[in-house]
Image (cartoon, rainbow, N blue to C red):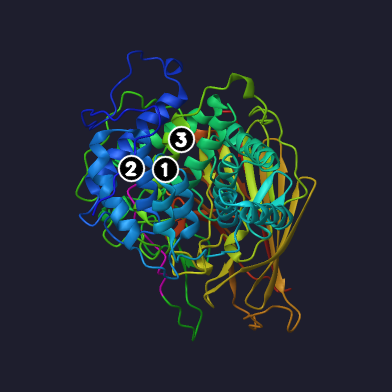
């Protein structure tokens, strides 16, 4: 039988007309609309989307882990009588969930504690017999700590001990690691947001320090979630938004609100990945027109396989090469539905797309959902977003908290943090983010994530969740390759000192070194490979005398268009960027993906010299500030 919750204290239930879209505010000036008001409007919009998508059994289409619990907290927190039937169905669904290995007790219990008016006995009945997952990642442990803080004295003591363990193993200066030694901007932001719910002053202070790092990221890149596990996902952007508003950083929260609003307007729902194109390019038929720059003659030994595609090797005598499979035709001017940092969305109306809010085969192994992992669920993230937007909208405007997070101005260099695996190098021309250690290859950045001073993504986050099936493999790491043997380089180690990254990798029977130097208005890359002494590379593959190496293999967004008037130079006039190389540059469409969608590949292709070495350099140079 349905169980009704009491309305939030001091908030009488009332019936309001359903809101089918965001209406323009009375004033057309953005400053007149407080960030909290905007967040509340978005929360109501998401609440209505969830209301329309809820199934008869109280859950949502496809299996989710915690969507029902966060939707319950959102609907009940709004205090609107129109959600009461949905609330009743959600309560029934939560009471019938079995205790399986996939039961997310930490998330569900946290949401129940944040649901106003829920009786203590009802919460206990929902959680009866359910066990904690005890996942060894920071955000899960903090969730569990917050739940223990709500319990009796032994539980509160356990919460204190758990915080000691978290701070000792997952905190590095202001940064919170995703897993020990592995940084993720998304899960750092989630930790910062969660710590604001703690009753302990030490936890709240750690949350404020973590929010300072978020503030610096947004101030210097225009984004909060560009690197590490979950890069580009709404989960991290929403968490960062809540943390910034909690700290009184309304100005820095504005670009994040713009990203969220524009995504809702474009898709009629909140995509899991705010920075990906959702694979819309895949439905475009190939076109015979040339690529984004004029056709040119390729070096000896190479021939163009198709207009605008990556050149392939001419086979040597008695050698059979597999035809290249990483070629994808793209429209030259195809533009994704991504965040535009200068575009206002206050007057926009959400697109009406009720029939297909996400692909039928959504998941990490389909190009239509880049940036997804196998455990991501659309409605989990949607309900989570609605709840935290509501709580952000309920924050009191705290003018005394402004500027307490230590955010830097975009034109000021960010201080290096030598105590963490995460680093940032900022100049007036660009910002570069990178991590050099982690538990898996996708935790490190062979190519830094680079944005212009206006927030344009030049070099996107690459790699993927290798713990699970995904779009990303060895070929999706921006490191050199040996096409004759179909080998792709694997990252080994790296150091960062001064303004220079020195990175080591192996490629078949070759040992490689990448040197990245950060200059005030440029970034220099140098790749050097040489035949490794016997047994010094994990692959122990013997080099061949006719080997050709594709150096760099940097990934650029597929819609970043170049002009090429010299084989060694590419120009991107729309962002004031020029790329020059010591050897001819190739920029070709590919089937590879970054965390933000399809990419084009930038490489220099050279034969191995007689001494067994191969080397080239290139420079990304900002000619102007694109003012």
Looking at the image, is 392 positioned above or below residue 166?
above
CB-based contact (under 8 Å), mark 1 and mark 2: yes
Question: N-terminal of the two: label 1 or label 2?
Answer: 2
Mark 1–mark 3 distance (CA, rounded to whole Å): 11 Å
Residue count near mark 1 (Cα–Cα under 10 Å), binned few <14, some 14–19, many ≥20: many
Task: Give the label on residue 5, or none.
Answer: 2
Range covered by the magenta-colored residues: 323-332
- Image quarter of the C terminus: top right
Which residue position is annotated with label 1? 115
Mark 3 or 2, closer to the camera: 2
Residue count near mark 3 (Cα–Cα under 10 Å), binned few <14, some 14–19, many ≥20: many
Residue sitting nearer the eye, 583 or 97: 97
* Residue 586, position as x, y percentages in the image: 51, 55
Element type at mark 3? helix
- Image quarter of the N terminus: bottom left
Question: N-terminal of the two: label 1 or label 3?
Answer: 1
Task: Give the label on residue 598, or none.
Answer: none
Task: Give the label on residue 391, or none.
Answer: 3
């Amino acid at each position: 039988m349905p169980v009704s919750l009491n309305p939030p204290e001091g908030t009488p239930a009332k019936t309001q007309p359903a809101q089918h879209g965001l209406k323009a505010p009375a004033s057309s000036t953005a400053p007149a609309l407080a960030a909290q008001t905007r967040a509340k409007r978005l929360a109501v919009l998401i609440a209505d989307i969830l209301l329309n998508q809820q199934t008869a059994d109280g859950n949502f289409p496809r299996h989710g882990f915690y969507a029902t619990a966060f939707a319950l907290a959102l609907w009940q927190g709004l205090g609107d009588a129109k959600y009461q039937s949905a609330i009743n169905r959600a309560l029934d669904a939560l009471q019938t969930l079995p205790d399986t290995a996939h039961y997310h007790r930490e998330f569900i219990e946290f949401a129940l504690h944040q649901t106003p008016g829920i009786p203590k006995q009802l919460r206990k009945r929902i959680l009866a017999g359910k066990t904690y997952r005890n996942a060894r990642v920071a955000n899960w442990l903090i969730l569990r700590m917050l739940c223990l803080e709500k319990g009796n004295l032994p539980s509160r003591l356990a919460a204190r001990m758990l915080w000691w363990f978290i701070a000792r193993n997952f905190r590095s200066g202001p940064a919170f690691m995703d897993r020990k030694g592995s940084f993720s901007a998304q899960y750092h932001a989630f930790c910062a947001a969660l710590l604001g719910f703690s009753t302990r002053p030490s936890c709240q202070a750690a949350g404020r320090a973590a929010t300072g790092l978020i503030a610096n990221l947004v101030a210097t890149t225009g984004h909060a979630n560009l690197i590490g596990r979950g890069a580009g996902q709404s989960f991290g952007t929403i968490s960062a938004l809540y943390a910034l508003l909690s700290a009184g950083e309304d100005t820095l929260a504005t670009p994040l609100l713009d990203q969220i609003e524009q995504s809702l307007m474009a898709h009629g729902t909140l995509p899991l990945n705010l920075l990906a194109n959702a694979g819309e390019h895949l439905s475009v038929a190939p076109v015979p027109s040339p690529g984004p720059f004029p056709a040119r003659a390729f070096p000896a030994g190479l021939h163009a396989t198709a207009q605008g595609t990556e050149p392939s090797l001419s086979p040597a005598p008695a050698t059979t090469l597999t035809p290249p499979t990483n070629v994808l035709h793209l429209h030259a001017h195809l533009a994704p539905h991504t965040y535009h940092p200068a575009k206002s969305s206050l007057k926009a109306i959400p697109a009406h797309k009720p029939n297909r809010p996400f692909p039928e085969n959504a998941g990490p192994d389909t190009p239509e959902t880049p940036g997804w992992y196998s455990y991501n669920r659309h409605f989990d993230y949607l309900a989570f977003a609605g709840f935290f937007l509501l709580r952000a909208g309920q924050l009191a405007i705290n003018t005394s908290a402004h500027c307490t997070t230590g955010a830097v101005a975009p034109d000021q260099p960010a201080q290096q943090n030598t105590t963490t695996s995460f680093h940032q190098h900022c100049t007036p021309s660009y910002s570069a983010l990178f991590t050099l250690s982690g538990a898996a290859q996708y935790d490190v950045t062979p190519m830094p994530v680079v944005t212009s001073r206006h927030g344009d993504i030049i070099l996107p986050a690459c790699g993927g969740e290798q713990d699970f099936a995904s779009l990303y493999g060895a070929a999706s790491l921006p490191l050199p390759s040996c096409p004759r043997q179909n080998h792709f380089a694997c990252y080994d180690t790296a150091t960062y000192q001064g303004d220079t990254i020195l990175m080591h990798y192996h490629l078949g029977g070759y040992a490689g070194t990448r040197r990245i130097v950060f200059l005030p208005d440029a970034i220099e890359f140098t790749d050097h490979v040489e035949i490794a002494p016997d047994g010094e590379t994990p692959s122990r593959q013997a080099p061949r005398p006719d080997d050709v190496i594709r150096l760099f293999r940097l990934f650029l967004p597929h819609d970043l268009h170049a002009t090429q008037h010299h084989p060694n130079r590419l120009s991107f006039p729309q962002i004031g960027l020029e790329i020059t190389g010591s050897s001819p540059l190739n920029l070709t469409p590919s089937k590879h993906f970054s965390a933000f969608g399809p990419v084009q590949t930038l490489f220099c292709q050279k034969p191995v010299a007689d001494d067994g070495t191969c080397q080239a350099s290139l420079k990304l140079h900002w000619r102007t500030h694109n003012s």
